[in-house]
Image: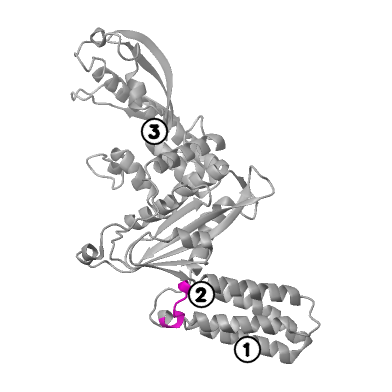
Amino acid sequence: MRVSVLLQITDDEGVARAAEPVAVFEKATERPEDVGLSISEGKTLMTAVQRRIVGSQVASWTARHRNCQACGARQRSKGNYPLIFRTLYGDVPLAGLRLHRCPCQGDHGPATTSPLGEFFPEHIAPERLYLETRWSSLVPYAAAAGLMADILPIASGANATTLRDHTLRVAARAEAELGEERPCFIDGCPAEWAKLPIPEGRIVVGLDGGYVRNWEEKKTNFELIVGRSIPEDRAPRYVGMVHGYDCKPKRRLFEMLKSQGLQANQDVTFLTDGGEEVRALTELVTPIAEHVLDWFHITMRITVLGQFAKGVGQRNEAIGARLASELDRIKWKLWHGNGHGARELINDFETDLADLDVDYPNLRKFITLAREFGVYITSNLASLINYGERYRSGERISSAFVEATVNAVVSKRFAKKQQMQWTRRGAHLLLQTRTRTLDGTLRSTFERWHPGMANDNGGHADHAAVA
């Protein structure tokens, strides 16, 4: 079987050109793999069609912009220059026309101009840039490049370095749109807030940190802060930044909440591990907000102390049982939001440990951890709530969901187990595209930059027809 594919293009005036062959295939029908187009044949077909379509569109654009915009006179040509336009369906070689400066401009402006260079200065189709950014946000750059080369007719640019540069460039553009940092984002007065419509419901924001290997200082790590915002009845959003590198952390957090319809009269709960840096990040972001020390991190520390108490119990069962009982009382006080009562019990617990006379090799470490736990609770007394009451009301009291967020945002892409190395800039910018990819807002960002991309989302009949 011989298959010939013909392409016919109708120009803007409605004049149809003669159909021309773009691909010819000799197809056998002997085995299952013979049926339909192969990957190679599909690439060949799409490359041929794309080159003719792009060539016709560029010729039309150049013809419409050949005249001077000021006086309308036809500008003289200074020849052509080679240009490669990178699309999803192949790299299209083009001849960019150079035009002399119009005499009406005098000596103002450049001596020559290029209409085509002004049309797409980046020399890459927005959809290809979107796909490169999306895939690079989900898998390593090399894997994304290999995937694109496997299924798309891309002759060049499908390598890890190119995809990394393109992805970081997209992130840098999004970063440039971020407003200025402010110490406080609370505007207006309570009287004005009371007049606002009733908000949709509480927004719960969990924030936590993760660490990746530093490329510049090989033996050190640096911290990433990631979070997830979960409104009661809207889609969740992700946020990510490199601690100490990001100069607009509060602005970033505020814009995430704003994208979810945040109002000044809306309840917002920030759940964190109680770290000073993360706690400071949540301050003065919105008026009706509370910072809560999440129950997950409290119980994690008590569980560790309980393991040491069991170790003591192996040497002296009575002492070990007494220590475990004291830890249960501390946990009960904290569960019911009695921070001061829990602090007194922790002080007594520390004193008991210091007075212990038991042959336990890890006693010194046990004492140190108990002291650190006391400092931890004291530093976060204002963030303790009645966890039992909240839990019975069906509200979130733990940022355990953020642990899953750390794994989704950091571990699965930044490959903690493989000890991949990152620069602070590279990690921070990749976080911006990865969070947008995970919460589904990357496409809308590109559609805002390139409104024409929105036309392809629904497969509208007025843009495409399939026979």
Q: How many marks?
A: 3
| Lower position in the chain sequence, tag 1 or tag 2 | 2
Reply yes or no: does residue 387 show up in magenta: yes
Residue 379 place in picture, x, y as percent = 53, 70
Classed neighbour count for the residue bearing mark 1: other residues with Cα under 10 Å, few (<14), some (14–19), many (≥20)? some
Q: Residue at x 38, y 45 (%)?
A: 178
Secondary structure beneath label 1: helix
Secondary structure beneath label 3: loop
2 vs 3, front mark = 2
**Residue 325 image label:** 1
Q: Amino acid at mark 3?
A: Ala
Q: Quadrant of the C terminus?
A: top left
Residue 10 visible? The answer is yes
The residue to which callout 3 is attached is 125
Q: Are the residues tagged 2 and 3 within 8 Å (C-beta)?
A: no
Q: Are the residues tagged 1 and 3 within 8 Å (C-beta)?
A: no
Q: Amino acid at mark 1?
A: Ser
User: Where are the magenta residues, as a range?
Assistant: 381-389
Q: Nearer the viewer, residue 6 or 230?
A: 230
The residue to which callout 2 is attached is 295
Relative side of 30 to 183, left or right? right
